[in-house]
Amino acid sequence: MKEETGLKEEETGLKLAFKEIEDIEERDEAALDLLKKRLLGVAIVVLFFFVAIVLRLWNLQIIEGPEYEKRSYGNRVRIRQVAAPRGHILDRNGREIVTNRPSFDVLLIQEDSHDIGDVLKRLAPILGTDVTALWAKVREASGNPRYMPVRLKEDIDWKTLAYLENHNRDFSGIRIEVQPVRVYHYEDLAANTIGYLGAISKKELEEADKNIYSGEDIIGKKGIERLREKDLRGQKGQSYSEVDAKGFEQKQLKTVEPLSGREIRLTLDVDLQQIAESYMDAGEKSGAVVVMEVNTGRVLAAVSAPSIHIKEFIGGISLEEWKALLDNTKHPLINKVVQATYPPGSTYKMVTALAGLAKGVIDENTGFYCPGSYTFGNRTYKCWRHSGHGAVNLNKALGESCDVYFYNVGQRVGVDGLAEFAQKLGLGMKTGVEMEYEKEGLIPTKKWKLKSRKAKWQDGETLSVAIGQGYNLVSPLQLCVMTSTLANGGKVYKPQLVEQVVDIEGAIVENFKPELVSQTTGLDKYFKLIKKGMEEVVQGKGGTARNVAIEGLRIAGKTGTAQVVRLAQYRGLKEAVIPYEARDHAWFTCYAPADNPEIAVTVLVEHGLHGGSAAGPIARAVLNQYFNGKSGAKDPSKLVPVVIDPEDGTIE
Amino acid sequence: MIRIDRRLFEHFDMVLMLLIFLVCMMAFFNLYSASFPPKGYGSPPYIKQAYFFLMAFTAFIFVISFDYQELHSWNYPMYAVIIVLLVLAETIGNTAGGAQRWINLGFFKLQPSEPAKLMLIITLASYFSRKEISDGYSIRNLLVPALLTAIPFVLILLQPDFGTAMMLGIIFVSMAMFAKLRMSTYVIMGSSALGLGIFAWERVLKPYQKQRIFTFLEPEKDPMGHGYQVLQSKIAVGSGGKFGKGYMEGTQGHLHFLPERHTDFAFSVWGEEWGFAGSVILVGTYFLLIMWGLYVAMYARDRFGVLLAFGVVTLIFWQAVINLCMVLGFLPVVGIPLPLFSYGGSSLMTTMLGLGLLMNVRMRRFQNSMSRD
């Protein structure tokens, strides 16, 4: 202000000096203007940066907004899968075979843990394991994101559970998860049929629906558990919770409860299954037993012996155990009901008889003389009874299983004729039962030999086929279907294992319905003749399975012996000195009651030598159980359900 | 005693004041959300920020009360005081978070590195206005201002507060360039900057700072470490979408996914809760504020005023741009707050003092020319 007034005072007096100052000021003004002009450039730089920032915001929030929204949701919301209780498996009478119980598993969520080393160190003695073992599990999961749980220990006992629940504050990142696990009320009952569970494999996971399965899942690996996975698995639940950056749950958002799997009621009958298994086990026998309702196809028992042991498969089988199973000469891993085929032996004689009758080669009274052998071409074919049967008609031929009679019939019918009727009885094709890797078996024809062996059919081979040796191969289930078909007069039913599938609300999703595969008509009188012959086998004086007879029950059946090797070195040897693996397989197949058939029972004992003596008693026990158990004469000592300890879930 | 002219009130810039208030209001609301839920002890940051604002506004009033020309004479004593404070902070000061050092004054934790920025602007503006060279400054002409910059620069770098030291460098380069440099100066400065950069990388930069640069170059490699902050910030801003999740509804912030969410990453909270629309409003307000600052420089009455206004604009502009670029994933994480918006008393005080200078220049734009009427 002083300056201002001062200048005004001297305005007139110092005109010259002022001019000088003005010049300087003008020069300053010009320089100032130049400086100010540079501000325009600055403004452009500023504009550039702000445009860039707005474009970046546009990109982040508008273009990639939805993606970041998802990531923010993923940050904030933890979705935890809640395993669904698997469907129960019951027998036809509603008896529980496989159910669930809760297993308490200890999980580690690395992300939530402040000091994993410390937590594991304190946890190891509580879980009764070694710290290094726990670390190994953590390392195993090193590829997974840190929020994914690492299963440290499964199925802890109540004491451990109570301790961990009470001290959960001390173990950051440790969580207890309740997971339903299987309980096997009858231990290994029908184990090869029902199957077992296991952790989903990488390959299975790749093929599975990612919306349903994840890497931690337990799925059916074998048998009904695998084939009916869809019914049994139920629907997983989800628990949504909001977590903060440290992974601590802030609040529960929502929970979708898991839906239990569907209950499967099998056609199997625990009593029959148990009795058959106990007989097979008692003799340490290897083989199969199939019991089927002849008029429906319901499978009442399906035994493959020796059975797998479910316990070995829980939590994954060890390599050694697996190798031992593979090397076991009795092949417990193979479900012999459908996965193994054997020459039918004399049980095939019903096919030959039916073919002979239907083709008009023989009738009820046609007789052949059996001198103990049969010469065809330049070869001699022996009858099992070397002394011969003498004059034989159909009834006697079946009852005493005369080979010579059937050589005659077979030769006259021809191999293709035999095959035609074998197929009518359900042989040579898959039965379609719900079991894995079912074998087709083999019913040879001329065409088949030309195609697969590149050779012409030799007529002599027909003789072998006619008595069930040679190329013929059938599975125990197929033979049971054949027996049922004979019993019911020509109806081939599909054997079925599932009686009912019931969902969690009690609605019946699936109900048993007999499925007719094929039906032969117009052969009733021939069936009658054959059935009469089969009854002779058990009830007749010279029958090969008289030992099976049960008082008050008419049983019709047929024994069979399937040759394993035809080496000359064993011929004529005493049976006891033939090595086990070279001994013949023993068949017995039957149905009862003979006049009004209800069930068919087929028994195969591998290397059992004689159908009547090795296989017959097992069939007898089953029939006895079925018919006499039905009338109330059950032996209670045979029915010992497994007791589950409610405290720690162990099976006593 | 300085007489206050009535015209000063007439020339009080309401536009500038309005823009400042707008940003401060947004900052205040945002802080409330960013510091929610409250910690349970001490005053929540938004309350403290309100106190800081009152203090800063008092300082603002003080700054506009005298003619900025007087700064020519206060310049060097002020410079000396700041340097002493920086040395004190280095020797007896406390550290927070391993970077900025502060001196506890009881009621206020003074970070001398903050006023150092402003002091440098005044010093350089004063120097460049007194030593005017029409055909541009040579490297020899720059020796004194470079030295004046280097002393606080090194002291702050030693703290080690890389971000603030960098700001000093940026202020020096911006102001020198604005004051016009010779071509030869650009060449020498460019090559020596390169040499210095290499030297800094080899000898000066701490491992954590190198780590930040590496992380910035490849953020996906370290999603839980340093890249985590930027990633979470991008998720926060990006998930805001068009109109945001709503005030107090931001999950990234409230669930602690965002680091430093009321200080350096305050904008992420804003972006998440107000979306693109809100972000553009905030960024736009900054743009207007900075443009208005340039406008003030345009109509300053003398060279000192132009340089002073430009210096303040430079400070606010670069801090805002660097902070936003960091928050939006353009730059590595450097501890530079968003002026007026981030929580922090020293930064707010510095910014308000700077804006006070801007207002000072604005209010006294006519004084010289009027004196000649």
Image: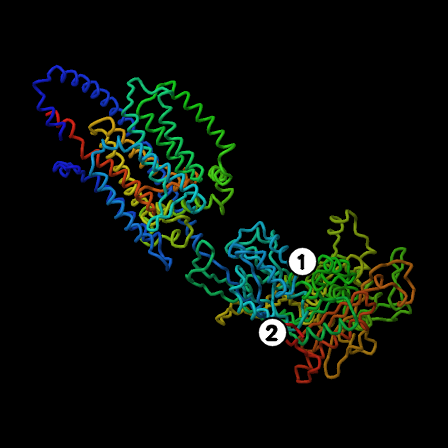
Indicate the quadrant where residue B43 lies.
bottom left
Quick one: A313 or A470, which is closer to the camera?
A313
Mark 1, residue position? A437
Question: Residue B186: image x %, image y %?
Answer: 38, 21
Relative to A600, residue A312 above or below: above
- Most extreme residue toward the bottom is A632
| Residue A371 in view of the camera | no
Mark 2, residue position? A96
Which badge, 2 or 1, comes first in the chain's sequence? 2
Q: Secondary structure at mark 1?
A: loop
Question: Residue B212: image x %, image y %?
Answer: 47, 40
Left or right: where does residue A120 sit relative to residue A244? Answer: right
Which chain hosts label 1? Answer: A
Q: Quadrant of the N terminus of chain B?
A: top left
- Most extreme residue toward the top is A16
Relative to A597, residue A43 above or below: above
Q: Which dot, 2 or 1, sits closer to the camera?
A: 2
| Residue B256 in view of the camera | yes
Circle on res. A339: none
Q: Amino acid at mark 2?
A: Glu
Q: Amino acid at mark 1?
A: Tyr
Q: Quadrant of the C terminus of chain B?
A: top left
Indicate the quadrant where residue A398 lies.
bottom right
Question: Residue A189: image x %, image y %?
Answer: 67, 70
Using the numbered discs, state the Cα–Cα distance from disc 2 to disc 1 in whole angstroms. Answer: 27 Å
Crowd band around label 1 with a 10 angstrom C-alpha radius: few (<14), some (14–19), many (20+): few
